[in-house]
Amino acid sequence: MELMGDIEDLIQEENVPSTRLRNSIMPRVRKRKAALTKEQRPEENGVHKVECDSIIPGTQKVYLKTWGCAHNSSDSEYMAGQLAAYGYNIVDEKLAADVWVLNSCTVKNPAEDHFRNEIKAGREAGKKVVVAGCVPQGAPRSEFLQGLSVIGVQQIDRVVEVVEEALKGNSVRLLGKKKVEGKKAGGASLLLPKVRRNPLIEIISINTGCLNQCSYCKTKHARGELGSYPIEEIVTRAQQSFSEGVCEIWLTSEDTGAYGRDIGVTLPELLWQLVEVIPEGCRLRLGMTNPPYILDHLEEIAKIMQDHRVYAFLHVPVQSGSDGVLGEMKREYTVAEFCRVVDTLRDRVPGITIATDIICGFPTETEEDFQETLNLCAKYKFPSLFINQFYPRPGTPAAKMQRIPTKEVKNRSRRLTDIFQSYRPYDHKLGERQEVLVTEEAHDRSHWVAHNKFYEQVLVPKEENLLGKIVEVEIIETGKHYMKGRLSQTHTPSSPSLSTPLPQGEVSGLPPTALTKTQTKEDFAKQERYIILSFVLLISALLAKLAWVCLTMLNQI
């Protein structure tokens, strides 16, 4: 399973079925259109059309690729889990796969362009292609999606059905919404099987959609209005995750601050209940929230982030330092309100990390507007600042506005980048002793990545048996985006996990009667051989009986 990151999030049982998930109503299936272009017909480009190497359903190889935010990553983990639980083999080598499942992001043009190119590559390679995510949900009639099977953002629990039909050559489109008592729900059950990209980290989507109508945002077209999961379901998923060796939980959505407004609960209510079930030493990270909805809960959020099990970290996108531009963006808050969020949290939670986003070159942004943005960023010196150039997304109000010349947009982006690069947020921490949680391997493959209480990245030596452990380090080096720590000789690393984490690629959340990861193609092939052998033995017995009858008759003549 391959993940491609984008912005939107930092850096990068309701009856779980025993074997597969299927509604009582079968999807309406239509045959793939025959009128494909020559480019779309791999057999006419000299590429042999892939034939499944087994007639047993659910035993083919699936390549799954993901673009976008943590919410998309979570959706892909659930899809991988269901496919693996049913017997499909999830592979990283796409050319070895029989079917490609591509989970898309619609935030920016480049992500959609990569998605479109991957579809083309799959078709040219003769692969069956299934598309998911925000692009097909928001624009299902796009020409480049014609003839493809589509899994809607709230239909990921039916991925097995869609993949099966795609392998048969059929085109299935499931784009409906999940509803509970007539109201939009959060989506597919959180208690479905999943394959975690990182066995130590559980990503939980607490709600889908949002309450905003931002003029530049295409995600709203896909994720729609707010739909929250019940507190009980989220807490149950967290407890299950901790029981499987997870030591860090990320809460994600398009806007975590808006959680629960549609079902009569609040984000602090959810967080307090989660804190009660977090094992000692494990951590919780709260995902992105927009300013309007966190304002109502600032004092409670500050108290929660003071808890040692919760990262003192919050991602609050401001997008612009100008009230005029924020109004044109329809962001529903002022610069002063954003500053109140930052000032209150920094005062109540000393050392808290506030990350934010800026869009450079929004169509109505003047030089004076942009100067206000520069002043805001220079004032707060955000340690994490995501700088983005404006992209007109089709179908959004901002796409109809007169654009600022590309050269000027790039110039503004460069000027803001210069301000961001002018300060180093971690130099004053040199020599500090910090307790950090190690959760993954660094890109240089020479260090482990750990995080301290403020979710600041600390690189530690890649010594054996440190992954998933709490260690004490002395900060010996600082960079723009990280610190490096030397392991303390007086502190013994400890594991906060309740149990041994699942092996990489293992299916999470399966009931005892469900298929396991080990029941893959070889197991089914073994069963098939037993069936054939039994059939041969039966025929042999019948032939022996027939021979005996014939011999008896001959003896009687």
Image (cartoon, helix red, strand yellow):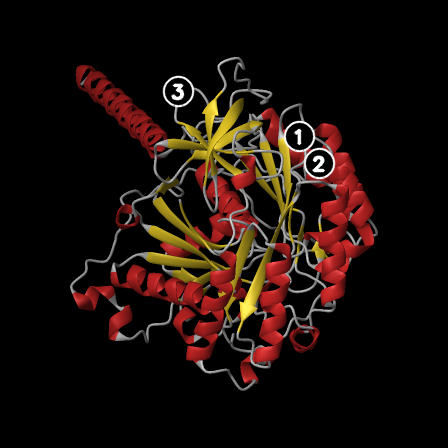
Mark 1 Cα-neighbour bin, 10 Å: few <14, some 14–19, many ≥20:
some
Report the mark closest to the observer, 2 or 3. 3
Please give the residue where the numbered disc 1 appears in the rendered image: 239
- Dot 2, how many residues are within 10 Å of its Cα: few (below 14), some (14-19), or many (20+)? many
Check disc 3: other Cα within 10 Å, few if <14, some if 14-19, many if 20+: few
Query: In the displayed structure, would residue 334 be above or below residue 441?
Result: below
Relative to residue 323, is residue 505 drawn left or right? left
Q: How many marks?
A: 3
Task: Where is residue 465? Give x, y as percent.
Answer: 43, 19
* Secondary structure category for the residue under label 1: helix
Q: Nearer the viewer, residue 263 or 323?
A: 323
The alpha-carbon separation of the residues under discs 2 and 3 comes to 33 Å
Q: Secondary structure at mark 2?
A: helix
**Residue 235 disc label:** 2
Residue that numbered label 3 is attached to: 464
Q: Is residue 129 above or below residue 282?
A: below
Cβ atoms at labels 2 and 1 below 8 Å apart: yes
The one nearer the camera, 367 or 289, is 367
* In the image: residue 424, left or right of residue 147: right
- For the N terminus, the quadrant is top left
Q: Give the residue type that dot 1 points to.
A: Gln
Rendered-image quadrant of the C terminus: top left
| Whole-number angstrom distance, CA of label 2 to CA of label 1 | 6 Å
Earlier residue among tags 2 and 3: 2
Outermost residue, left side = 46
Q: Please name the amino acid that badge 3 sits on.
A: Glu
Residue 469 appears in the figure: no
The nearer-to-camera label among 3 and 1 is 3
Task: Identify the element where label 3 is drawn.
Answer: loop
Residue type beneath disc 2: Val
